[in-house]
Image (spheres, rainbow, N blue to C red):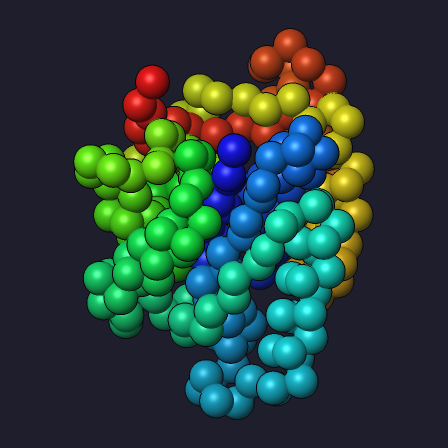
Amino acid sequence: MSILVVAAHPDDEILGCGGTMARLAADGLDVFIAILGEGITSRHGQRNQADPVQLRHLQECSRRVANLVGAKDLFSFSLPDNRFDTVPLLDIAKIIEDIIGRVKPQVIYTQHGGDLNVDHVATFRATLTAARPMAGTTVRSVLAYEVASSTDWAFQKFSPIFCPNVFVDIGQSLETKIEAMKVYENETRSFPHPRSPEALRAAARRWGSVAGVQAAEAFELAWEIR
């Protein structure tokens, strides 16, 4: 069975489903990761002011993280950070569509459509477009994940509101998620920031309590074919 995780930025894949990827890979499933955006360039006045060395380092971190969670392969692209709304949605969808054709996933995990971050919103819509359930598709379900400091900081003011209805037990892989996030040293923050190790553990424990397990990641099912 093949799983595809679609992320707008380096670190979204770990924040959203790092524990799930590690668990699925350990269970013998083929996990593929697609990161659409370059990351960090929005922190500069002009996109070309970003340090190429830092960008390369970020890509290297993504590769290390993919190896850490047991992913079979990582696909990286260079869409402009926090500027996906300047890219035609069709172009984003075609990137995802091409990956779907290559890895033939049965399950796709992607960003949530009600996040504060505009890139997450575009990624969600593009994924739904690329994975539409046409005859012959391998995709049987699409799920949206939350991202700390983006889904929560939307304060449920943007539609759709994150309403998780699928939970993955990550009791055995939570610490792998935490260690993977530490690889993104420039994206990790100190508590009480939502991307701190303490906050990520607390979120996993909270969803675990909802699902009756020690720790869990939460997802909202967009659609499923049984």
| Residue 135 in sight here | yes
Horizontal side of 59 relative to 109 (left or right) equals right
Residue in the image at 37% along x and 30% along y = 141
Horizontal side of 146 relative to 14 (left or right) equals left
| Residue 125 in sight here | no
Q: Which residue reaches farthest bottom?
A: 49
Q: Position of residue 4 (x, y in %)?
A: 48, 44
Residue in the image at 24% along x and 61% along y = 89
Q: Position of residue 213 (x, y in %)?
A: 68, 14
User: Height in image: 75 above or below 170?
Assistant: below
The one nearer the camera, 204 or 192, is 204
Residue in the image at 35% along x and 37% along y = 138
Q: Position of residue 14 (x, y in %)?
A: 62, 47
Residue in the image at 35% along x and 58% along y = 98
Q: Position of residue 211 (x, y in %)?
A: 59, 13
User: Height in image: 135 above or below 72?
Assistant: above
Horizontal side of 59 relative to 2 (left or right) equals right
